[in-house]
Image (tube, rainbow, N blue to C red):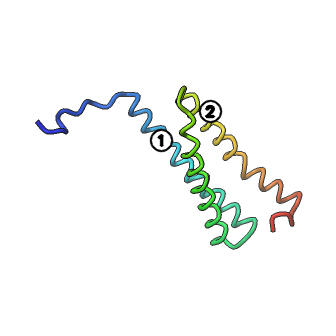
Amino acid sequence: MTALALRPAPRPIDIALLASVFVVAACGLLYELAAGALASYVLGDSVLQFSTIIGTYLFAMGVGSWLSRYFERQLPAHFLRIELLVALIGGALPAVLFIANAYVPGAFR
């Protein structure tokens, strides 16, 4: 028998985890694209803005990876809390930045 034949069928929880990781990754890419587009629209110089946004996201992923060692229990609950917080911040941030730019137009240059 080969190793492939001995492999157990995927459990529903494994499929749900894979689907949630896919959704979270897609949302992260969309947040990155929205933040880069907004920054280049408000501040100009799209190459600098997208480079800064991509670098910031990579740095944040590294920090999150480093901090993940401190989460040992209740992983699904922590995952849900963190992702809901990211969704709230990521969804509200473009509107907040546009409002901030309207009231304090020279502060971001």
Q: Position of residue 44 (x, y in %)?
A: 72, 71
Residue 9 position by quadrant: top left
- Front residue (pair 61, 109): 61
The N terminus - image quarter: top left
Question: What is the secondary structure assignment of the residue under circle 1?
Answer: helix
Q: Amino acid at mark 1?
A: Val
Question: Alpha carbon of mark 2 to alpha carbon of mark 1: how far?
Answer: 15 Å
Q: Residue at x 82, y 59 (%)?
A: 101
Q: Position of residue 102 (x, y in %)?
A: 85, 59
Q: Residues at badges 2 and 1 in contact (C-beta under 8 Å)?
A: no
Number of other residues with Cα within 10 Å of mark 2, as a class: few under 14, some 14 to 19, many 20 or more: few
Q: Amino acid at mark 2?
A: Arg
The numbered mark at residue 90 is: none
Q: Residue at x 43, y 32 (%)?
A: 16
Q: Identify the residue under disc 1.
A: 21
The C terminus - image quarter: bottom right
Q: Residue at x 41, y 28 (%)?
A: 13
Q: Identify the residue under disc 2.
A: 81
Residue reaching furthest left? 1
Question: What is the secondary structure assignment of the residue under circle 2?
Answer: helix
Q: Position of residue 11 (x, y in %)?
A: 34, 28
